[in-house]
Amino acid sequence: MELALYDPEHGYYASAPRRSGKNGDYYTSVDVSPLFGATIAEQLVEMWRLRGRGDFHLVEAGAGNGRLTRDILDATAARHPHFHRRVRVTLVERSAAARAACADMLAPHAEHLLACSADLPREIDGAIVANELLDALPVTVVQMTEGGLREVAVGERDDALVEHLRPLPDPALESALPGVERGQRLEIGHAACAWIRTAAASLSRGFLLLFDYGYQPSPGFRSAHPDGTLMAYRSHRASGDAWLSDPGGRDITAHVNLDAIRSAAEAGGLQTLGIVDQGSFLMSLGLVDRVDTRDDTRALRQRLSARTLIMPGGLGDTMKAMVFAKSMGVPALRGLQPGRLS
């Protein structure tokens, strides 16, 4: 998964500046509407006020070509000029092709851009934001067999990539995963938890705001997803059995274990402020108030895109907003009140 997605020459994300949207392989909330970034901006402004209204370092991780940050800055320039003047931006993106496109994307806000880097900066005083980053980090896949839990590894046969089972790299994993039934698969997101620990260490003061496909582990969830959640996407079609096909040519994702992310964050010194459905988060921040109520085609399209962002059964409840803080106490953030906790 690491090689297929991030190899500097042949990896899926490395070979193009943009992979999402109508002409890509999948949609994100950023593709749906700039309302997503504009509503996140409201939460960032509140965070800035709680932090003391000085210079605010906004770091977007997994930034792609910077469209989410552009939407945030467009909104703050129009509605929150005091915050806009104090915000400084670093975009973090592993793809060199996407990093090369960042300057053009943020050209209207060039004076706010500090850097576009492959790595998180140190001593961040402000906020780290990431949208659909964790689900695209490599996972370990395990399967319960008659002989116990085994790792699903990747091998090669007849010039094709194939799966094979091997002993667990850490035998303690089996006792840490009770209740897995024979034949069931699940993913373990070691890389996502490692990234959370790195982000916690990089944040000297402020907030970590994440959006991703998330779940809480339970027998019911495993029964509903007996083959796990590992999926490959191409041309907006998902497949659970094509993730070894055409390496470098498909997106590969897996849902995020919310309990594991919370534990990693708190072990790294972060305070969990809340984990809520994306729809609840955006509505609490006034997304509905931003929607144009006029009767023209543009307004209708905007209303439909807003609905896509918040409706249950889609992005509204499959996507989770996760908010953590460091050296900020436990403030009652607007985006989390009220909110349907996951």
Image (cartoon, helix red, strand yellow):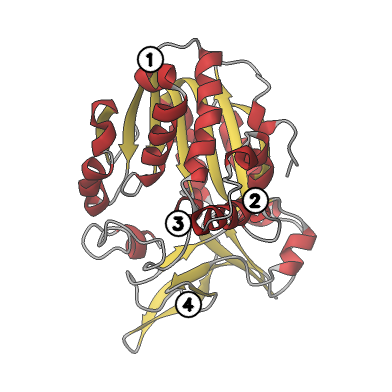
Check the image and report above or below for 125 versus 104: above
Q: Is residue 155 visible?
A: yes
Residue 162: x percent and y percent? Answer: 43, 80
Q: Look at discs 2 and 3 and give the one toward the viewer.
A: 2
What's under tag 4, amino acid-wise? Glu
Q: Look at discs 1 and 2 and give the one toward the viewer.
A: 2
The C terminus - image quarter: top right
Identify the image quadrant of residue 180: bottom right
Q: Which residue is mark 4?
A: 163
Which mark sits nearer the N-terminus, 4 or 3?
Answer: 3
Residue 125: x percent and y percent? Answer: 42, 19
Mark sitting on residue 55: 1
In the picture, measured across the screen, residue 202 lies left or right of residue 267, that is: left
Q: Look at discs 2 and 4 and give the one toward the viewer.
A: 2
What's under tag 1, amino acid-wise? Asp
Check the image and report above or below for 285 versus 192: above
Contact check, label 4 and label 3, Cβ < 8 Å:
no
Count of number-bearing discs: 4
Question: Farthest residue toward the bottom?
Answer: 158
Q: Which residue is mark 3?
A: 138
Residue 186: x percent and y percent? Answer: 62, 63
Q: Residue at x 64, y 42 (%)?
A: 288
Whole-angstrom CA distance, mark 1 to mark 2, is 31 Å
Identify the image quadrant of residue 285: top right
Whole-angstrom CA distance, mark 4 to mark 1, is 50 Å
Q: Which residue is mark 2?
A: 310
Q: Look at discs 4 and 3 and give the one toward the viewer.
A: 3
Whole-angstrom CA distance, mark 3 to mark 1, is 35 Å
Contact check, label 2 and label 4, Cβ < 8 Å:
no
